[in-house]
Amino acid sequence: MSEQNFSSGPLEYQTEQSRLNILGFWIFLAAELALFSTLFATYAVLSGRTADAPAPFELFEPTSTLIMTFLLLTSSFTCGIAVHEMRNGSKKGLLTWLIVTLLLGFAFLGFEIDEFITYVHEGATLQSSAYWSAFFILAGTHGLHVTLGAGWMILLVIQLMQRGITRVTSRKVFIVSLYWHFLDVVWIFIFTSVYLIGMVM
């Protein structure tokens, strides 16, 4: 199934099973929100407790942080275009924009890994202080989620190549897009409450 019009609403909502699966995923995202809320609360409590380790303003680099933010937010936009192409019945467009989203996601992860390595070399590790423990757990958990989301998207790209756009694959694309947008929203909070505030602490 490649180019065609879906006139009876979005394909991913056309079966009861799909609607239930999407609802279930929203509930899962609520649990994920609770997880990240806990991590943010822990970070807020431990903020400033750097002990003898470097302070965040000594290590946080505005340029790399802005690049990471640009990459991830742009990937959210391209993921939205992928869903739009899917709803237009364009398998080629869907695959193209999912792959672009993946490339942006991997670029983000590359910058984040390089950042973590730099911090460790500068003496900021998980064991250095309460602050850096909270930072690495919060940012690392988000990075792990991005990695899992990218892996999920790769499997979906393979499935789309084999089966095309169906009610099942369209549901999976929509659900992975919800997950990806959720991670972008979490990153906005990390960017503002961790990096921006940390640069002036």
Image (cartoon, helix red, strand yellow):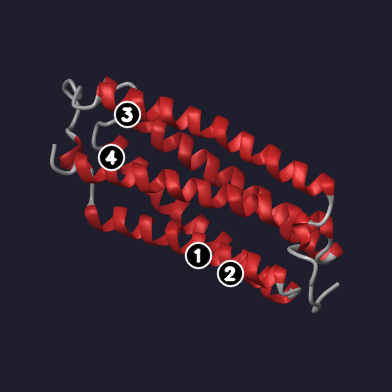
Q: Name the residue under label 3.
A: 125
| Residue type marked 2 | Ile
Which mark's residue is nearer the viewer, 1 or 3?
A: 1
Of mark 2 and mark 4, the one earlier in the sequence is 2
| Residue found at x 31% / y 27% | 43
Q: Disc 4, disc 1: CB below 8 Å?
A: no
* Residue occupied by mark 4: 193
Q: Which of marks 4 and 1 is nearer the N terminus?
A: 1
Label 4 packing within 10 angstroms: few (<14), some (14-19), many (20+): some
Q: Name the residue under label 2.
A: 81
How far is disc 3 from disc 4 in space, using C-alphas?
Answer: 20 Å
Is 7 on the left-hand or right-hand side of 99? right
Residue at x-position 13% and y-position 42%: 200
Mark nearer the N terminus (1 vs 3): 1
Secondary structure, mark 2, is helix
Q: Could you tell me the amino acid type at mark 4?
A: Ser
Residue sitting at 16 percent across and 41 percent down? Answer: 57
Tags 1 and 2 touching, CB below 8 Å: yes
Q: Which sits in the foreground, 107 or 101?
A: 101
Q: Is residue 134 left or right of residue 75?
A: left
Point out the residue furthest to the bottom here.
3
SS category of the residue bearing label 3: loop
From the viewer's perspective, is residue 169 above or below residue 114?
below
What is the distance, in whole Å, between disc 4 and disc 1 at their CAs?
A: 23 Å
Q: Which residue lies furthest to the left in this view?
A: 200
Question: Do labels 3 and 4 touch, CB within 8 Å?
Answer: no
